[in-house]
Amino acid sequence: MHYIVMDLEWNQPLSHRSAAYRRLGSQLMFEVIQIGAVKLDAGLRMRGSFNQFIAPANYKKLHPRISRITGITQDDLEGAADFSEVFARFVAWCGEDFVLTTWGCDDISVLHQNIAFFAKGHPIPPVYDLQRLYGEIAGDTKNRFGLKNAMNALGIQPSPEHPFHSAVDDAYYTALVFQRFPDPEAILKHPQSVRAFGRVRGRQPGKTDTLRFSSLAQALLSRPAQQPNCPVCGKRANIPEGYVMMAPDRCRALADCAEHGLLMIDLTLEKDAEGGVRVKRSATVSDEQSAAYVKTKHLQWANKVAASRQKEASA
């Protein structure tokens, strides 16, 4: 038996009002544009890698956000094979008697939809979640750890030869994390299930409350800002990246509620009825909750936070 650690990159429509998305969005929300993978033997030694671009057939123009995050360009996709051909090559490369793994369930959900659209009838092997196994090993099964967080905790340093957000390089780093697990066969206890895609319709629930702080700087250091409550269930939500200043008197962060998904958290400085100044906190459930959208949004937000902090450091 051997292990396959897989990672995907995918493109999205330029607009949900585009003709292609209106025609196909319910069947194909994202198109896979790169399959990357690393093969490990039973002793978790690396035995090879797979890396191929895929020419998108429907959302043909690469979304600028995807290009910025992944470093993939339109030229990289020119002349690439279509999804069915690359997926067939990937299946052949995997060989026999393998365990397919990914970090989290986003990739398998996108892959499942692309297989259903482009390669109808092709069987999908079971896929297992290394992210959930890492949480079990770390003693925290409630939170979803990012790959970079797991690398930091295990002392794994990134290298310039393997840039993040390239499918094969993310698979490589995931394989390095997997190599630190004490019992690799424990991954079989964490099968993945495919999440259905779909836009959440209608006005999403939100909640606004007033904090006791009179400045954004004070509020940002507080627990109500760093662990905001979900407006639906009231449970504490996790903020993976941080806040970005949207205006001199307002900042925003993305948060994740385990039950209700992606949240938008705003801290706004406003005058109260007595003429004083207080910080108001608002939390709103995002109207888009597909796993792939949430992953892309968090990647985009991480870049915004990094750029904001760099700007503050140079000021």
Image (spheres, helix red, strand yellow):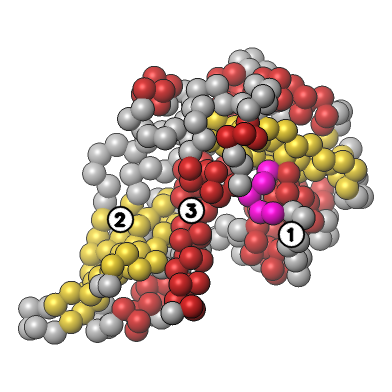
Residue 291 in the image: x percent, y percent? 50, 43
Classify mark 2: helix, strand or loop. Answer: strand
Which residue lies most toward the top here?
A: 121
Q: CA distance from mark 2 to mark 3?
A: 19 Å
First in sequence: mark 3 vs mark 1: 1
Residue 133 in the image: x percent, y percent? 70, 54
Residue 7 as seen in the image, left or right of residue 239: right
Which of pointers 1 and 2 indicates the residue nearer the eye?
A: 1
* Disc 2 residue type (three-letter): Thr
- Tell me: residue 111, above or below residue 58: below
Q: Which residues are magenta?
A: 163-167
| Residue at 44%, 32% in the rendered image | 13
Residue 61 in the image: x percent, y percent? 49, 31
Between residues 1 and 286, which one lies in front from this camera angle? 286
Q: Can the viewer see residue 15? A: yes
| Residue at 74%, 22% in the rendered image | 88
Residue 139 as seen in the image, left or right of residue 241: right
Residue 241 in the image: x percent, y percent? 49, 64
> Residue 300 has which mark?
3
First in sequence: mark 2 vs mark 3: 2
The residue that label 1 is drawn on is 160
> Residue 284 has which mark?
2
* Disc 1 residue type (three-letter): Pro
In the picture, residue 55 is in which quadrant? top right
